[in-house]
Amino acid sequence: MVQLSILDLAYIGEGFAPTDALANARDLAQHAEAAGYKRFWLAEHHNLAGIASAATSVCIGHVAAGTKTIRVGAGGVMLPNHSPMVIAEQFGTLATLFPSRIDLGLGRAPGTDQRTLQAFRRGPGASENFPQDVVELRALLGPRQEEQVLHAIPGEDTNVPLWILGSSLYGAQLAAILGLPYAFASHFAPQALTQAVTIYREKFEPSDQLAEPYVMVGCNIVIAETEHEARRLFTSPQQQFTRMVRGTRGQLPPPVDDIETFWSPMEKAQASAMLGCSFYGTPETIGAALAPMIKETGADELMVVAAIWDHAARVRSYELLVEALA
């Protein structure tokens, strides 16, 4: 069976507060651990009313402290927003507190708007240094070298596993050249998925971290006891992506009975394209729905997103996915 993991953005639902979102993230991770999920990742986003995982390393510590065995990490840290030294110290500290449980996924996008990017005091060309920053970060987390001047303490020799995250061919090629595992963000940008995975496998060069290519595929999956309820729960991410199209993001909305009354035909087309790697259904139908995508990509692991407004329904969806694929 393909490995299952969870990508969480610590969603702040309408009618709730960041306190609820962070408590729910930790509770979901505990249920995921009990259900057998391999990883629980949190994503860095900024200046968004519906996401509470902006201070990603802090959120990872919060979740890791409430769990025992599941791997916890970043999916990802947007490296152009930070210096490699700071990230090495943060994740080296996490790896020291929670040995053999921390992952570090790295993205090249800023994860925010241009005005917020300016607030980080990082230059507009910071993303151009992404490959060099990844190499520098890997060295800071690796063993001490002779005549080395800079040391991340904690961090040095923790060898926190690095991942390259991407939604284009750029990330696929970089992950291949550096011999790192590759996670494709098909949960919101599925268009280049097959081509990127193919390029990654063809150009992969083994490294000390990874001997063979390893592909993680992001997807949205919503499962409920009935098809009607699964379809209804899925209207929350549909509304969320429609608001992205409109430029009116907000907190995660509750589901609606008829999504067709919410979006226009053009909005439907644009939102549905972004949600192209999405699946909803019952435990009896979801396995057959996922099979072609898993076969086509040869995914080693699925990173599952479930933007469900009701926390209990969200937890249950993840539990039902494990039961369905078992």
Image: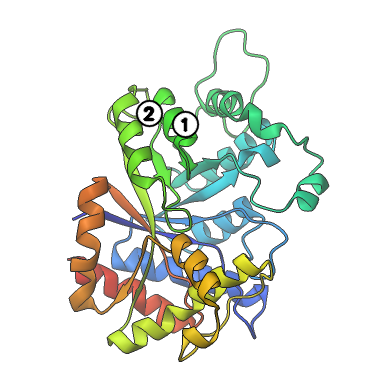
Q: Secondary structure at mark 2?
A: loop
Label 2: how many Cα within 10 Å (few below 14, some 14–19, many 20+): some
Q: Give the position of the N terminus as an image quadrant.
A: bottom left
Residue type at numbered disc 2: Gln
Q: Measured from the top left, where is residue 26 in percent x and y?
A: 51, 68
Q: Measured from the top left, where is residue 265 in percent x and y?
A: 51, 75
Q: Residue at x 37, y 23 (%)?
A: 208
Q: Which residue is mark 1?
A: 159
Q: In the displayed image of the protein, which residue is found farthest to the bottom?
A: 257
Say whether residue 185 is visible.
yes
Q: Residue at x 37, y 46 (%)?
A: 193
Label 1: how many Cα within 10 Å (few below 14, some 14–19, many 20+): many
| Apparent side of residue 175 relative to residue 129 in the rendered image (left or right) | left
Q: Residue at x 57, y 55 (%)?
A: 61
Q: Which residue is mark 2?
A: 209
Q: In this orientation, which residue lies closer to the viewer: 317 or 280? A: 280
| Apparent side of residue 27 relative to residue 125 in the rendered image (left or right) | left
Is the residue under label 1 in contact with that under label 2 (CB below 8 Å)? yes
**Sequence-first disc among 2 and 1:** 1
Say whether residue 152 is visible.
no
- Is 68 situated above or below 108? below
Instruction: State which quadrant residue 100 falls in.
Output: top left
